[in-house]
């Protein structure tokens, strides 16, 4: 196979397919079939060995040599191609001025042509083109994997919270887990309540750190006496109670030791509170 | 096609049409905050590990609602993923609206381009669709994001089916058909009513393509197209089957009476051109678009019938769709005449597809008219862009509403009585009545049992119960509905889930002892069957896509014969 001849033949095949597509759109099936046969012929020409190019072979016709070349290139199911070539020969009429009769098997011929076209285009790609394509595919796959991983981690790789109730939409339960001590989860007015922390997967727990709320400049809400209970799938596996000593506008932390295995949920109950209600700035599981 | 500057302009305009949305906190459409609530619920269920949520656990004050079984999940499902991972719920929904707006512009452009192969005609067709009052009013005035996403997908679905019918390479044609079917399935799941009616429109268009292929002797090609479109509702089986099966278990009957009765929602022809007694701006005013398409079509038929005759089918579809909204079609919407047709509620929803078909006809007519050359100029494109933006503007300006008025997380939703619907249509009929206040605890009462602990994570509830006698019962503050299951993690016997007289869940403990049980909402029996139907449809589409490729070891002679090929 002469590479430049092969590429020329491939280009010719692509042009023939484009023409066939236009004719097919207009419902001119026999004319379309004619161009498809031209494309098929051009594709086979691309596979004819260089020695036989242009002047035919001394021993075998071009088609047979092309088929052998295809088999050597590990073209799958070459028998289908042979059958399609036979069908194509049948469908072509003897009179070159008359349109080709696609017969009943035009689809089989076109299917095989499409397969041959795909294989040929892939085979005759230059190493540089192949490398570029591989690089592009690799980058695309990497980006997709990265996006999937990031979404997975954001969706199911971090803890989330539910609360018995919240005072307002500015003080949601999620704010106790956002890593910002400036934002606070607050329970409704003068009522005890709880917040559930659900880790992404069952985990071992050693301690719980509670950072108390104070409600910004209003300075009217903070938790006082709290109970922390760890749950596994089977029920409670550990509980501890603690108490914040005083209301403070400054950072107020309560570390509670709590050893538990296979923890799927940690409930922090506010039993009593300072001033008008309870809440937390942050809850950390360790 | 995609690198054409006019295509880029169409995409830019589809973005610009969403710009007012990003300027507002939220917009005061007819739907209000309902999509916000649905998205929050979906996000919560997703975060709790449910890949396909079916239950809204915090609606009706925590008693729950099977809304996700019935209402098309695509828009709040996709926004739910963004809400659960990166964005706040308002931004997530806006991003999805932007996505579907761009998709509708690109889809309309691709559809007209496929019909005409002319970028200029495609540009005008796509712009006419993007600027159509119904499309924009559907978003800004109605706030029906589900229907907006559905009619955004419609052009791309039609474009792909048409491309499959016109593609000469069989493998590529099958891939296009499979892609069309897959997006068609998504379209059905985006809005149940318009998914159904959109499918009828798509079906008529595909039927025309199939007849053409058949008449050309390409029966196998026609067969694969029919198979592909048949798989589309099958793909949506996981959603459609439960929705159809359990419809009568909710108050969906309330959806088609009173204000929502289709027979009384006809439109006067004058409303297609002028003001509407209720809606202002009148998003039903697609009359100018239809008239322009009609005039252009008539002219092209007079002067260039041979090439312009393609407009006939599109205009026929347009007139049929518009005709169904007029008082003369009163008989068509008579209860019981056509199954499920009542659920359209407002026949004028068909003005969405009618806007598309008339835009396509306009594009085809322009492509084959003498105007196609003068309209190619930069000045004409710029002036028409300005014109379309100008005519769209009245439909883009709706009242802004504050984000503060909406619940921002599931706990806030549970603190009120929310249903995210107007007619409470997804309230289970077995429930005694609407709750007057939110339930405080999961366990409402018990007989002969002590509750050791209880916890909820969306529609998953864990309970530690101690039965003091055989046959003890624990009443839960959750509505009963097909799909609830109970699993006994430990205990002397298997706990049983039942429904009490007020239509709520009841856990029965057969013998005395300590139980750990998990109650959760999952796939209902119809959901399981629907899931299998979807899986089979996926398999069928995979077979269609790979048919005749190297993946198939040998041919199947009987199938070839059956599909019209030679033996």
Image (cartoon, coloured by chain):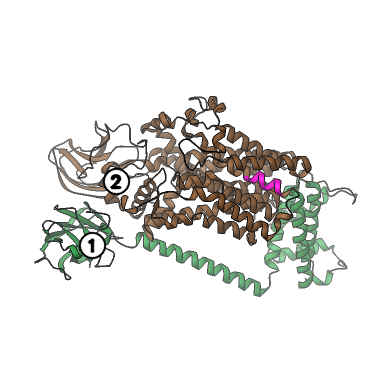
Chain colours: A green, B brown
Chain letter, disc 2 residue: B
Quarter occupied by the C terminus of chain A: bottom left
Answer whether residue B364 is magenta in the image: yes
x 38%, y 45%: residue:
B32
Q: Residues within 10 Å of mark 2 (few under 14, many from 20)?
A: many
> Considering the numbered disc 2 on the image, is that residue within a helix, a strand or a loop?
loop
Chain letter, disc 1 residue: A
Identify the magenta region.
B359-366
Determine whether, in the image, residue B25 is placed left or right of residue A160.
right
Determine whether, in the image, residue A207 is placed left or right of residue B412.
left
Q: Residues within 10 Å of mark 1 (few under 14, many from 20)?
A: many
Determine the CA span between mark 2 and mark 1: 23 Å
Determine whether, in the image, residue B389 is placed left or right of residue B455.
right
Q: Position of residue A175 (x, y in %)?
A: 27, 61
Q: Residue furthest bottom?
A: A128
Name the residue that disc number 1 marks.
A184
Q: Is residue A46 above or below residue A33?
A: below
Q: Are marks 2 and 1 in contact (CB under 8 Å)?
A: no
Determine whether, in the image, residue A88 is placed left or right of residue B398.
right
Are tags 2 and 1 found on a single chain? no
- Disc number at residue B58? 2
> Considering the numbered disc 1 on the image, is that residue within a helix, a strand or a loop?
loop
Camera-side residue: B154 or B444?
A: B154
Q: Is residue B550 above or below residue B194?
A: below
Q: Is residue B238 above or below residue A17?
A: above
Determine which quarter of the picture holds residue B222.
top right
Answer whether residue A82 is magenta in the image: no
- Principal SS element in the magenta part? helix
Q: Position of residue A27 (x, y in %)?
A: 76, 45
């Amino acid at each position: 196979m002469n590479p430049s001849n092969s590429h020329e033949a491939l280009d010719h095949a692509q042009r023939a397919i484009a023409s066939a597509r236009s004719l097919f759109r207009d419902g001119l099936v026999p004319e379309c079939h004619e161009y498809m046969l031209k494309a098929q012929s051009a594709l086979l020409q691309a596979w004819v060995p260089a020695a036989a190019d242009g002047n035919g072979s001394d021993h075998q016709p071009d088609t047979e040599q092309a088929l052998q070349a295809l088999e050597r290139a590990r073209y799958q199911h070459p028998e289908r191609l042979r059958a399609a070539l036979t069908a194509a020969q049948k469908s072509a009429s003897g009179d070159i001025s008359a349109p080709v009769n696609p017969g009943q098997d035009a689809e089989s011929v076109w299917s095989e042509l499409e397969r041959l076209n795909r294989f040929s285009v892939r085979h005759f790609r230059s190493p540089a083109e192949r490398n570029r394509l591989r690089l592009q595919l690799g980058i695309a796959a990497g980006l997709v994997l990265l996006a999937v991983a990031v979404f997975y981690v954001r969706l199911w790789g971090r803890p989330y919270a539910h609360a018995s109730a919240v005072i307002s939409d500015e003080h949601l339960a999620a704010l106790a887990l956002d890593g910002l001590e400036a934002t606070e989860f607050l329970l409704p007015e003068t009522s005890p309540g709880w917040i559930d922390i659900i880790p992404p997967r069952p985990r071992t727990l050693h301690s719980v750190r509670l950072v108390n709320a104070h409600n910004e400049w209003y300075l009217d809400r903070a938790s006082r006496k709290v109970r922390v209970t760890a749950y596994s799938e089977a029920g409670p596996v550990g509980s501890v109670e603690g108490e914040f000593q005083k209301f403070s506008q400054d950072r107020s932390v309560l570390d509670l030791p709590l050893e538990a295995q296979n923890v799927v949920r940690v409930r922090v109950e506010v039993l009593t509170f300072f001033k008008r209600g309870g809440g937390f700035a942050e809850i950390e599981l360790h | 096609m995609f690198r054409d500057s006019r295509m880029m302009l169409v995409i830019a305009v589809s973005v610009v049409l969403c710009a007012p949305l990003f300027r507002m906190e939220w917009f005061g459409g007819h739907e209000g905050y309902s999509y916000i609530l649905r998205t929050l619920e979906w996000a919560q269920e997703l975060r709790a590990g449910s890949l396909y949520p079916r239950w809204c656990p915090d609606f009706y004050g925590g008693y729950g609602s099977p809304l996700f079984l019935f209402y098309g999940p695509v828009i709040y499902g996709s926004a739910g993923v963004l809400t659960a991972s990166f964005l706040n719920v308002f931004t997530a929904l806006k991003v999805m609206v932007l996505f579907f707006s761009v998709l509708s512009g690109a889809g309309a452009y691709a559809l007209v381009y496929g019909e005409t192969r002319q970028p200029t005609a495609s540009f005008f067709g796509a712009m006419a669709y993007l600027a159509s009052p119904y499309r924009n009013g559907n978003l800004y005035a109605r706030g029906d994001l589900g229907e907006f996403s559905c009619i955004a997908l419609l052009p791309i679905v039609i474009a792909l089916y048409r491309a499959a019918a016109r593609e000469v390479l069989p493998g590529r044609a099958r891939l296009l058909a499979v892609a069309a079917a897959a997006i068609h399935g998504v379209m059905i799941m985006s809005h149940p009513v318009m998914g159904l009616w959109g499918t009828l429109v798509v079906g008529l268009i595909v039927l025309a393509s199939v007849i053409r292929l058949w008449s050309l002797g390409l029966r196998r090609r026609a067969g694969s197209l029919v198979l592909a479109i048949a798989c589309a509702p099958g793909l949506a089986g996981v959603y459609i089957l439960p929705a159809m099966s359990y419809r009568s278990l909710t108050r969906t009957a309330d959806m088609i009476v009173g204000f929502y009765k289709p027979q009384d929602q006809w439109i006067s022809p004058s409303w297609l051109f002028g003001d509407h007694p209720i809606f202002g701006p009148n998003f039903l005013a697609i009359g100018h678009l239809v008239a322009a398409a009609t005039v252009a079509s008539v002219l092209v038929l007079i002067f260039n019938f041979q090439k312009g005759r393609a407009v006939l089918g599109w205009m026929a579809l347009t007139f049929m769709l518009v005709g169904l909204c007029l008082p003369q079609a009163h008989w068509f919407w008579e209860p019981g005449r056509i199954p499920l047709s009542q659920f359209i509620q407002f026949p004028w929803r068909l003005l969405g597809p009618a806007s598309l078909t008339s835009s396509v006809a306009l594009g085809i007519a322009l492509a084959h008219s003498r105007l196609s050359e003068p309209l190619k100029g930069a000045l004409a494109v710029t002036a028409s862009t300005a014109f379309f933006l100008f005519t769209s503007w009245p439909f883009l300006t709706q009242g802004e509403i504050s984000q503060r008025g909406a619940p921002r997380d599931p706990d806030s939703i549970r603190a009120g009585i929310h249903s995210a619907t107007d007619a409470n249509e997804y309230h289970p009929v077995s429930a005694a009545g609407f709750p007057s206040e939110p339930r405080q605890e999961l366990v409402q009462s018990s007989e002969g049992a002590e509750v050791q602990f209880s916890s909820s994570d969306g529609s998953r509830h864990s309970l530690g119960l101690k039965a003091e006698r055989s046959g003890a019962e624990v009443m839960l503050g959750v509505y009963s509905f097909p799909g609830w299951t109970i699993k006994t993690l430990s205990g002397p016997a298997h706990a049983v889930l039942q429904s009490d007289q007020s239509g709520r869940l009841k856990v029965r403990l057969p013998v005395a002892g300590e139980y750990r049980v998990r109650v959760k909402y999952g796939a209902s029996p119809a959901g399981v069957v629907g899931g299998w139907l979807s899986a089979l449809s996926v398999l069928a589409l995979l077979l269609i896509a790979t048919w005749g490729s190297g993946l198939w070891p040998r041919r199947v002679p009987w199938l070839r014969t059956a599909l019209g090929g030679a033996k």
